[in-house]
Each structure stands twice: as structure tokens, then as C-alpha cells.
Amino acid sequence: MTTASPKLRIQEVALHYDDGQTRALDGVSLEVAPGEFVAIVGPSGSGKSSLLNVIGTLEQPTAGQVYLDGKAYSEIRDASLFRRENIGFVFQSFNLIPTLTALENVVVPTVGGSGRVAAHRSRAQALLAQLGLGARMGHLPGKLSGGERQRVAIARALINNPRMILADEPTGSLDSANAEQVLDILKGVIKQQGLAMIMVTHDAKVSAHADRIIHMRDGRIEQEGGT
């Protein structure tokens, strides 16, 4: 457990399927402090992705509770709105829309939300410039390198000023140089803005960048510690 006041708190969370016969998560408890980067590792079927899905409100736990900045997930009325306003997602496959430019892809999560279109566009431009893509924001994803596409995805994850970043193998499609760059960017952002970041990875070199590594097996936390 962390000693700082937690940004994220997971309390005895369980996720069962098939009338309780399959236990994807079995009493998981975890705290993540503001500005902390936590890597979750473990073999396939250990519960890593299930835990990320519960934290991201993509699945509702069978038992237990999750809190973000003290707000219980059980109090959430609109999970989709909660995700848009509080959580930034970064995926291995980038998930960019191929027919939209880098700038337009970053703006997508703001559609239907509050605020003026011009303000969202201005923030997207600032984020892309901050991530070294100021000259590339008018390009379609197919014209960008893998590292550039992942930086666009990071900007998209940040556009709504989230309180937490969830990353699922975000460097899995990148070469080692681009992977290092992406990890450095993510670490810098969460430290600067006091976000929590939880990353699922199979790569020991990636998890070594984390402040703390959580080892999972059979739906439980088997071991945790610093890098």
C-alpha cells in the first residue's frame, strides 16, 4: 500500500463469471497515490485486464468497491460520462480513426461534452505541440510513425484533463527507442499533473520504469514492490 493519500483505492474487489465458478478477480485491494505509476504484471489469465476493466468502469465488480479521489464507483450514474471526464485510456493498437487527422483524433473525446469547440481544438493543438507533434497535427495516422501515433493517442487520453491514466500494453507495438520515449512522456505527464497511472504489461523492461510493480496470479495480488 502507498503511504500518501490515495488517488485511487480498490477495496476487496471481486469479479466472478458463470455463477461464481470463474473468479477473474478474487478480493483485490490496492491504493495508488497521485503521480504514481503502477505496473501490473502476471501470466495470461491472472486478472490483469479484468482489473483494468473494473478500474476503467468497463465492467462492474461482483463485490468490493473502487474509489477515485474518494468518490465511490457505486455512486456513478453514467459510466460513459464518468470515463470521459475522469479517465484517459492508452492502448497498444493506438485506436486512432484512420480518416481523421492527428488533431481531429485528439479532439474526438470532447464531442458531446461541455465547453466550446474552439477551446477543445486549442487544447488539442497545445498537447500535440507539447508532445513534439506540432508539425504533424494535420497528418492522417497512416502518415505517422508508430511512435508518433502513440503520442497522438496520449494527447487524446489527456484532452479532457483526466484524473487517471489506464494503459494496456501501450508500447507493445513500438520499437525499443519509441517505447522509451513514450514511457518518458507518460511518466512526465503523471508526475507533473498528479495523475495516477496503471499500466498492464508483459514486458519486464517496461515495468521497470514503474514506481511499483504489482504481480497478479489467479485473480489475486501475489506480490508488490518497488522497481
Image (cartoon, rainbow, N blue to C red):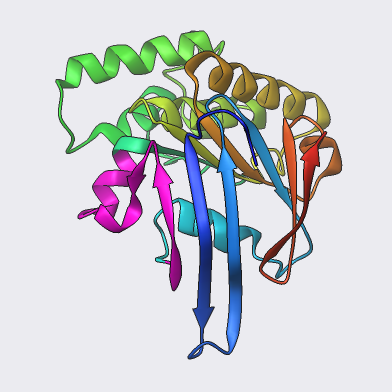
Relative depth, front residue between 57 and 224: 224
Q: Give the range drawn in magenta.
A: 61-84
Q: In this view, does 87 lie above or below 28?
A: above
Q: Residue at x 46, y 25 (%)?
A: 155
Residue 197, x across and y down, in percent: 57, 35
Image-based side of 77 in relation to 153, left or right: left
Q: Tell whether position 10 is magenta.
A: no
Q: In this view, does 120 lie above or below 221?
A: above
Q: Is residue 170 above or below residue 193?
A: below
Residue 74, x across and y down, in percent: 30, 58
Quadrant that contains the C terminus: top right
Quadrant that contains the N terminus: top right
Q: Tell whether position 70 is magenta.
A: yes
Relative depth, front residue between 190 and 92: 190
Image-based side of 132 in relation to 39, left or right: left
Relative depth, front residue between 48 and 115: 48
Residue 28, x across and y down, in percent: 60, 61
Q: Which residue is drawn at 42% across and 30% down?
A: 156
Image-based side of 205 in relation to 6, left or right: right
Q: In which quarter of the image is residue 92?
A: top right
Q: Residue at x 79, y 41 (%)?
A: 225
Q: Is residue 35 above or below residue 2?
A: above
Q: Quadrant of residue 101?
A: top left
